[in-house]
Image: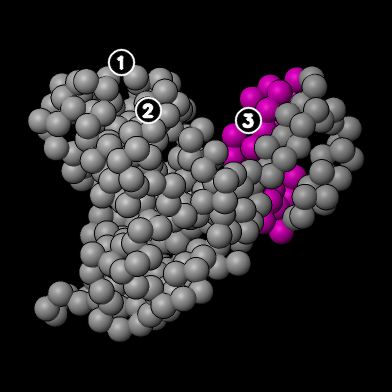
Amino acid sequence: MSFLSIEHVSKKFGDYKANDDISLSIQKGKIFGLLGPNGAGKTTLIRMITRILLPDTGTILFDGKPHNDKHTERIGYMPEERGLYKNMKVYDHLVYLAKLKGLSANDAKTKTVQWLQRLAIESWRDKKIEELSKGMSQKVQFIGTVIHEPELLILDEPFSGLDPINSQIIDEEIHRLKAEGKTIIFSTHRMEQVDQICDEIGLINKGHLILHGDVMELKSRFKQSIFEVKFSESTENIAISGIAVVEQSANHMVLKANEKSNAELLRLLLDRGLQISSFQEILPTVQQIFIQQVNSSTHA
């Protein structure tokens, strides 16, 4: 079921059209990657979803209803530009943010303690924000985004400044929130994270939506018939008509076979008497699809 529907939305600033007739849907309980190069229009679209800005044309439906200011209480937004008050202590700041989102004073305090414990940062509670490293303040910002249990989370570069251990902690929290049925919009420049995290993606370039869909379906659509083959014994150079050798070592080979299906290629190799231990098609990464589509739309 679509939780957020964006229908023919456009936004101009003077003569500059930041978003041009964008339509996409984000399914409930999914992690949606909102991608695009710098200046593509991602931030403008996010600001319309959060109602910081309003569309010039088009409509946005939130949980099946016309988007209005009351819906913002059900949204948690973690912007790339962090907005914490440097002179406030961590505990006081999180209680303050929770109360801004409608929690009672008691609930705000209870939730703050729970989240500090969950992320194992109770020792930070009396530190001022200005004393924190970028990674530490990132975790505090994350708590401030989710503390009121929003149904829609918008996370813009949530892993920025985090070391591998803390990145894993935030990754686990994102997946736990998804398992609870939260809908998540994830925006980042790190494409490997999109591969690991996102169910669906939307790619914006120059204000236009140029690609939108399920990650695995898009990988299948843009695959290039490249196969990785591993052998159980050393193998000499192989020459098969219509098949290009991209990479080869004694026990490993990458082949490009545009006119051959998986089964046809595998049969050709087996007919050569080769001892195959592993055979798989290599699908493109999100980054490869991203670069290809941005370049195509830029030069169109």
Image coordinates of residue 84 in percent, x first then y, are: 18, 39
Question: Image check: 91 left or right of 240?
Answer: left
Which label lies toward us, 3 or 1?
1
Front disc: 2 or 1? 2
Disc 3 secondary structure class: strand
Q: Which residue is mark 3?
A: 248
Residue most extreme to the top: 123
Task: Tell which circle, 2 or 1, labels the residue nearer the N-terminal end.
Answer: 2
Q: Amino acid at mark 1?
A: Ser
Is residue 250 in view? yes
- Depth order, front residue of 284/92: 92
Disc 2 marks which amino acid?
Val
Residue 34 x/y as whole percent: 40, 56
298 over 135 or under it: above or below? below
The dot on residue 123 is 1
As drawn, the residue found furthest toward the bottom would be 57
Residue matched to label 2: 113
Q: Residue at x 87, y 38 (%)?
A: 270
Amino acid type at mark 3 = Gln
Q: Is residue 91 magenta?
A: no
Relative vertical location of residue 69 with respect to residue 130 in this rendering, above or below:
below
Disc 1 crowd, CA 10 A, few/some/many (<14, 14-19, 20+): few
Q: Earlier in the sequence, mark 2 or mark 3?
A: 2
Please give the name of the residue rendered at 35% of the width and 78% of the height, measured from the top-left corner.
9
Query: Secondary structure under badge 1?
Result: helix
* Residue 67, picture quadrant: bottom left
Residue placed most toward the observer, 97 or 197? 97
